[in-house]
Amino acid sequence: MLWIPPFLGAMTEGSDGRRLPVPNAVATFYAAGTSTLQAVYTTRDKTVGRANPYTSDDQGIWGAVHLDDALVYRIKVTDANGVTIADYDGVGGASAAVETVDAEAGASYAFVSGDLGHLVKRTHSSTMADTLPTAASVGNGWYTTTYNASSYAQAVTVVSAGTINGASSFTLQPGQWAKFVSDGSGYFTAPTPLATGKRLLASFDASGLNPATTTPCASLVKVEFGTNDVDVDVLDFDATTQEYAYGSLGFSDSYQAGSLEYRARWTVASGSAGETLTVGAQARCFGDDDAIDQAWGTAAEVSDAVIATGDEHVTAWTAITPANDGAGRKCRFRVYRKGSTGTHAADLRLTGIEFRGILNKSNDA
């Protein structure tokens, strides 16, 4: 495997702030965790050995160094006076090509030089605060990758007030991963787009919906909850006749087809706790030149129970597959209360409906 010489970190800062090679720097290749020399090579096929220790020239230039894929190395780099510039342990010929995944749980994790080339998978039951070693201690070219596998934010800082992209910290949201690369004085990274995980796409109050032409629900009514003068728009749905309201939303170009879910928000003006009812929805997507008068997709229904009159009720998220589902399309939907189903005999008062789905691109361009 090719060993990239600048990764050795034998760089220093010039008077103008530029990173400069260190003349006559010495790289020594040991077996991992030891001071026992281990073979390196000048050619990929390992037919020609490389001097070990290996010294850069008067301009700090290195020739190519190839590692044995079957071995794990410790690589120590010093200047011409023997002062340590960097000391990497746990560097494998194979592991440098394929990242090793390390699972680390807990509220905090301190990355170490041995995390070189590793992917650190982080989990915890709340927010996490992690630290990188100083860039100077690991040297130019050192890198590690982390993946936030939790449901909480992962904040990463550098010990001794070091910087990431020139800032004091970098935060990964759930589902993000980032590769941190050192240039010997600071770290640089860029987050990956959130390719997985559901996102709220749209939220409609009842005022954003309309009674259907055929078998409509009641017209929009403004209801005041009088003690604190809270006004809420509602659409009333009968307990026996299956009535409908409709609306539409636009899918972005980053929407992942097949991931749509909805939940309904509702209340009741009468009835008893525990009484049940069922809400349903159907949808169809439309692209350029699609005929509008086409069949709805298969209905998806969800049952819920009365908690108390005058309370906000929220159904569980329920998967729905619109007909002709796809990114960048108009999604028209209709919502209903399933007639003659459940034990709640009075009207359901729909206060709104929400949709969520997966976005799988970093932008909609």
Image (cartoon, helix red, strand yellow):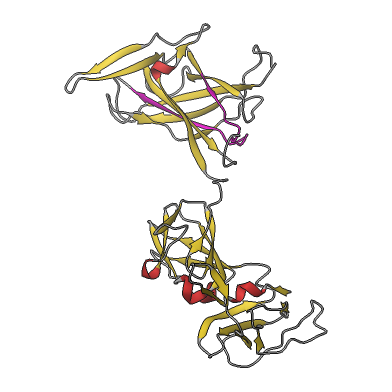
Residue 13, image x and y in percent? 50, 72
Q: 265 and 340: which one is in front?
A: 265
Which residue extends farthest bottom? 36
- For the question of whether residue 346 can be seen, the reply is no
- For the question of whether residue 314 can be seen, the reply is yes
Q: 321 and 338: which one is in front?
A: 321
Q: Compared to 237, does 161 lie above or below?
A: below
In the shown orientation, is residue 242 left or right of residue 57?
A: left
Q: Residue at x 57, y 88 (%)?
A: 80
Which residue extends farthest left? 227
Q: Residue at x 20, y 20 (%)?
A: 229
> Within the magenta stretch, is there residue 157?
no
Q: Compared to 182, does 246 lie above or below?
A: above
Indicate the quadrant containing the C terminus: top left, top right, bottom left or bottom right. top right
Which residue extends farthest top? 213
Q: Residue at x 36, y 27 (%)?
A: 275
Residue 263, image x and y in percent? 45, 30
In the shown orientation, is residue 346 left or right of residue 282?
A: left
Q: Compared to 146, does 135 lie above or below?
A: below
> Within the magenta stretch, is there residue 266?
yes
Q: Which residues are magenta?
A: 248-267
Indicate the quadrant containing the N terminus: top left, top right, bottom left or bottom right. bottom right
Q: Residue at x 55, y 85 (%)?
A: 79
Count of numbered labels shown in the rendering: 0
Q: 26 and 231: which one is in front?
A: 26
Residue 253, image x and y in percent? 61, 32
Q: Quadrant of residue 238?
A: top left
In the shown orientation, is residue 229 left or right of residue 115?
A: left
In the shown orientation, is residue 130 left or right of residue 179?
A: left
Q: 157 and 57: which one is in front?
A: 57
Residue 141, image x and y in percent? 58, 69
